[in-house]
Image (spheres, rainbow, N blue to C red):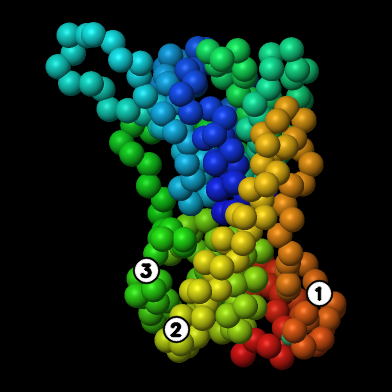
Amino acid sequence: MPELPEVETIARGLARNLTGDVIESVWLGSKPEPLKSRPGEIVRALEQARIAGVRRVGKHIVVDLGRPAVASRQKKPKQQAQWIVHLGMTGRLLIANPEHELPKHTHAILRLRSGRELRFVDPRRFGRLAVVRHGFAATGAEPLEVSFDSFAGLFHKRKMPIKSALLNQGLLSGVGNIYADEALFRGGVRPRRRAASLTRSELKGLYDALKEVLREAIAAGGSSVSDYVDANGDAGFFQFQHRVYGREGEPCLVCRTPIKRIVISGRSAHYCPNCQK
Ligand SMILES: [Zn+2]
């Protein structure tokens, strides 16, 4: 499942490739699950819109839609819409030439003025496409931008395990299982600790570690994003080195103690029982 760094990398790649292009027409498939807005509404918002930019908000890809300037009698320009894509488990946005064979499970095709197509492909259909007109905002704080004081405030009096708090999208937007485990390892904090029990210096360590792992992961993904958005770009592109995630029973890279795996609220958590307190 794509996490924040993957979504950031994909959004940057799309921004580089698509900004300035115009969506000439839209085809939507017949499966209802991927469409969070009504199909007619999506088509109306996208057709003839100029792609003003693409960015990440939380784990969402936000495509800012502009209108080509027209001399009209309208007193006020209509509020600009945004196309919101959530990739879910298996969703991909592919830039392709029309002659490229259409992959199975294609749910949307945007035909672009440049002659290319932007295709939304999603075998498991947990991804979502929506259109908003009032400005899209994530529910939680943006982990790469939140100040330390705001970050520390998120966990004040929270009895839930710190791992669950990091995953809570109402508190922080876009942190998933892998990077929560990796940040807790680097911060030296056990995943089951109650969030409110962390000292200020532990919170500072965790805050720095979370930003560090996310930035490193974005840097690791950035080099091969073109593979991801190309027509056949289904290869795993992510070269980020996990230190605890998925390494149950393997030696800790710092102290050689075997990495433990536990389950917290139905999600697996990996940690070093020696390095993390
Ligand atoms: Zn260790």
From this viewpoint, is residue 249 visible?
A: yes
**Residue at numbered disc 1:** 248
Dot 2: few (<14), some (14–19), or many (≥20) neighbours within 10 Å?
some
Extreme residue toward the right, this view: 250
Frontmost of labels 2 and 3 is: 3
Quarter of the rendering containing residue 156: bottom left
Residue found at x 37% / y 68%: 147
Quarter of the rendering containing residue 250: bottom right
Q: CA distance from mark 2 to mark 1?
A: 27 Å
**Residue at numbered disc 3:** 147
* Sooner in the amino-acid sequence: mark 1 or mark 3: 3
Quarter of the rendering containing residue 272: bottom right
* Sooner in the amino-acid sequence: mark 2 or mark 1: 2
Extreme residue toward the front, this view: 223
**Residue at numbered disc 2:** 196
Instruction: Give, as a three-letter code, the residue at label 2.
Output: Ala
Q: Secondary structure at mark 3?
A: loop
Instruction: Give, as a three-letter code, the residue at label 1.
Output: Glu
Frontmost of labels 2 and 1 is: 1
Frontmost of labels 1 and 3 is: 3
Residue found at x 65% / y 71%: 182
Dot 1: few (<14), some (14–19), or many (≥20) neighbours within 10 Å?
some
- Please tell me whether residue 57 is drawn above or below residue 229 in the rendered image: below
- Please tell me whether residue 269 is drawn above or below residue 3 in the rendered image: below
Q: CA distance from mark 1 to mark 3?
A: 33 Å
